Amino acid sequence: MQLHRARKEFDEADVRLALIGIGTPEEAAEFRRVQGIEFPVLADPERRTYELAGAKIATLDELLGLRLD
């Protein structure tokens, strides 16, 4: 949502935004509609883009656990 709120700044910098999620195309379309997002929301249910970017799915401990770095 922060990217959506800052879309004017991206437009002025001639940057095009797109969001990639791991849901289905139908879920991506519904998310875009419900959230009122004006830039493309793409679906990657196989998570290929996540793998190419080196991202991983966080475990519950990673999401909720206390980290002391």
Image (cartoon, rainbow, N blue to C red):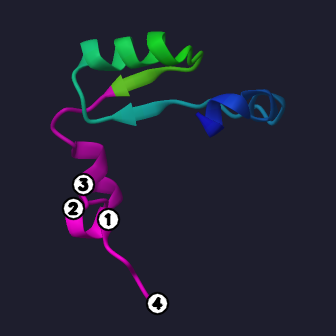
Q: Is residue 46 left or right of residue 65?
A: left
- The mark nearer the N terminus, 3 or 2, is 3
The numbered disc on residue 69 is: 4
Alpha carbon distance from label 1 to label 3: 23 Å
Where residue 29 is drawn, which disc sits there?
none
| Mark 1–mark 4 distance (CA, rounded to whole Å) | 15 Å
Q: Amino acid at mark 4?
A: Asp
Name the kind of residue labelled 1 in the image: Leu
Quarter of the image that includes the N terminus: top right
Is mark 1 in CB contact (under 8 Å) with mark 2? yes
Q: Nearer the viewer, mark 1 or mark 4?
A: 1
**Quarter of the image holding residue 27?**
top left
Do tag 1 and tag 4 residues touch (Cβ < 8 Å)? no
* Residue range of the region highlighted in magenta in the rendering: 43-69
Amino acid under label 3?
Answer: Glu
Q: Nearer the viewer, mark 3 or mark 2?
A: 2
Name the kind of residue labelled 2 in the image: Leu
Q: Secondary structure at mark 3?
A: helix
